[in-house]
Every structure is written in C-alpha cells, then in structure tokens.
Image (cartoon, rainbow, N blue to C red):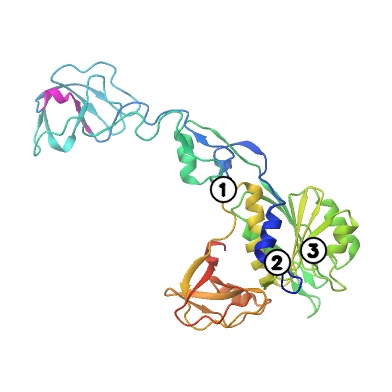
Amino acid sequence: MAGGLIPLAEAQARLLALASPKPAISVELLKANGHVIAEPLIALRSQPAADLSAMDGYAVRAADLPGPWTITGESAAGRPFTGKLASQEAIRISTGAIVPDGADTVVVQEDTSVERATLTLIGDGPPRPGAHIRRAGHDFAQGAELASAATRVDARLLALAAMAGHGHLNVHAPVRVTILSTGDELMPPGAPLPSTAHIPASNGIMLAAMLQGLPVDVTMPALLPDRLEPIAAALQEHRGADIIVTTGGASVGDHDLIQPALIDCGGTVDFWRIAMRPGKPVMVGRLGNAVVLGLPGNPVSAYVTALLLLLPLVKTFAGFRQVLPDVLRAPAGGPFPANGARQDYVRAVLSDGVLEPVRSQDSGALSSLQTANALVIRAPFQPEAQTGEPIDYIALDRHR
C-alpha cells in the first residue's frame, strides 16, 4: 500500500475476479467476427476431401512415364472425371480438380505438347511419381481441432471454419457496457457552450471508441448532472448491464457522487483509489450483477485507466485468453526522472527505436495523449532511467 492506495496489480486482480466469460451463443459466421469462440473449432469434414491437382496439366499413371499418352477426358473443379484411367491414358485436369481414379501423378501443362489427342513430354524430364497432387486431408482431417477455445474470431478463422463445414460458431455473448458521464460542466460534443465554465464531453466518446472492435453492446445515455438523484436513477436503470463505467465523480469531493449514489441504490464498493499516476481516483463496486467501474473525469486519466482496467474487464467477460496489454521494452532516448510511491504511466513517443517523454504530462492534456504512441511504465520508487537504459512501455498504437 502507498498511503492507503491499492497497487495497480492488486486492483486489476480484484477487478477481474468479479468477471467471468459470458455464456455461449450460436451465431452465423460473419456475425462471429471479433468474438471469442467458447469451444474448440472441430473440423466437420476433411480438406481436401479427395486428392486434388495442384496445377493445370494432365493426370497420368506414374507407371506410364515418360509417355506418350492418349487424352481421353477432362477433370475440372466441381466437374470431376467419372471413369477410371487406363494404361497410357491421360486426363486433362485443372487446378483444384479431383484426380481421376487410377491416376497418381500430374504432369504440368508447360511441360507437355499435345497433337490431336496425343500427349508427350517436352520438359527437362518426367516428374516424380505423385507430383503436383494435394492429398485428401492434406490441410486438415475430419475431427481435427483447428482452433482452441478462447481464440478470437478473425477473417482467417472465419475462412477456416467455413472450409471445415461450419455455418455457425459458438461464441461468448456480447458484453453489455453502459457509459455514464457526469458533470455539470459537460455539454454534448459539437453543442454550443453556454459559458467558459462549460466544456465538451469527450470521455464518453473516447471510451466508446476504445471498445469498438471488441464484442460489446455499448449504451451511452445522456450526460448526467452532479446531483445524487439522477446519478442513482441512471445506475438503477442500467443495473442489468455487465459493466457500468462512469467518468467523473468517483472521488470524495462535495460533487463526487458516484459512491454515495451506488450505495443509495443498493450497490457496494469493493475498493477505490489506486497507487498509479494518472488515474488514482478509481472506484470498483457491484450493483446487482453489474460491475461498476468509476473512472476519473480528467480525460488522460480516463484513457489510461480504461486501457489498464476497463479493456481487461471487457475482455474477461468476452472470454479472451490474454486480457492485459503487452508490456514491451525499448531504450530510453533521454533521462526519465526517479519515481515516487505511485506507479507512473508517462506519455512518450517511440521513434527510431527509442523512447522520449512528451512535453506535457498533465492529466487533462489531450493533445499530449494524441502525440504519444507509448506509455512508459515507471514502477514505484524506481530510480532515474539513464539514456540508453531499457525501459518498459505499452504501445498505444495497438489500442487506438
């Protein structure tokens, strides 16, 4: 603990312990994109289901090499030759077509000459027996496990599932997320500002954008004033969500009403205040089956805490195997100062393989967050990092 603050690793563990993967649902293939499969993907058929030609050419018997042959038919993709190949016969064959019964080798078209119905070789020599044939089950066999449970569905897996005979996939259901933005000073983006005391609301749209691409159903109601009753009513209305994430009002000031509103409508607070910078005033609680995650109002603090807490929580509900962001290493391009009692996340730019801090580290400076492409991790009481020293960071370009 640092002055009663919870270490980030403990906060992440306690938060993620409140979640478990959503139940499985069956969806059409394309609708499964971005979801996580809830069970192993098993091949319902072999691919290929029969021996196929890998080239355009002629199917022959290896015993008849080096020819010549009499061309007696054709096998095309989707229209196989139905007879059986006899000695010294050849079948014209297309790439992907079934190798005729009796044939065991394909002679490529470029190495042949055809005059009337007679096929002869003109290449450097006869092909090896069995050449240019994709054997049945070469890609995968019926009953094979093609992907393990907890694999995220993407274009490659969808193609594999389709080829394996699937029209639907069992995936974890979408995570229901409600984003509540609080503050008397907030106005909808693009709306006229009544006075200099008002600002556009940026956190809600930022959080919703961070969740895009994940299997979530996001609800973002109207902005809430700093009053207990409407905040409690909004929490109560959305208690059926998996996650209620709030921005602003999670601390203990006179206008920080998330905690009392949560308790007022029957919820509980698990913990609040984390030993990190930016983002100390984070609150985690429960309301019915919903996990309530109260994030700070300062936009950079909201972004960093969403990256380290909200996204891992969503991924846990969604059934992901890995939920925390990857920690990478690169040399410092200049000194990074010694750190205090809280774990620091320093906005930085990774350029030419080295990390440099951006000029402003203020938690309200969105322009510096846009400039940064990395968050350098400075552990509590870590000494100054010298130029060239390897330091840990999280790549922001992976999470924009």
Position of 383 relative to 296 (above/below)? below
Sort mark 1 into few (<14), some (14-19) or many (20+) by Cα contacts within 10 Å: some
Mark before the other along the chain sequence, 1 or 2: 1
Residue in front for this viewpoint, 109 or 366: 366
Q: Are marks 1 and 2 in contact (CB under 8 Å)?
A: no
Q: Is residue 111 magenta?
A: no
Residue 103 pos. (x, y %)? 22, 23
Q: Quadrant of residue 221?
A: bottom right
| Residue, disc 1 | 34
Disc 1 secondary structure class = loop
Q: Quadrant of the C terminus?
A: bottom right
Residue in front for this viewpoint, 92 or 136: 136
Disc 3 secondary structure class = loop
| Residue, disc 2 | 203
Disc 3 marks a residue whose amino acid type is Leu
Position of 270 relative to 242 (above/below)? below
Residue 397 pos. (x, y %)? 52, 65
User: What residue is rendered at 25% in x and 36% in y?
Assistant: 55
Mark before the other along the chain sequence, 1 or 3: 1
Q: Work out how far the residue at label 1 is from the one at label 3, CA to CA, in angstroms.
A: 29 Å
Disc 2 marks a residue whose amino acid type is Asn
| Residue, disc 3 | 223
276 vs 112, left or right, is right
Q: Are marks 2 and 3 in contact (CB under 8 Å)?
A: no
Disc 2 secondary structure class = helix
399 vs 177, left or right, is left
Q: Which residues are magenta?
A: 57-65
Q: Quadrant of the N terminus?
A: bottom right
User: What residue is rendered at 63% in x and 56% in y?
Assistant: 312
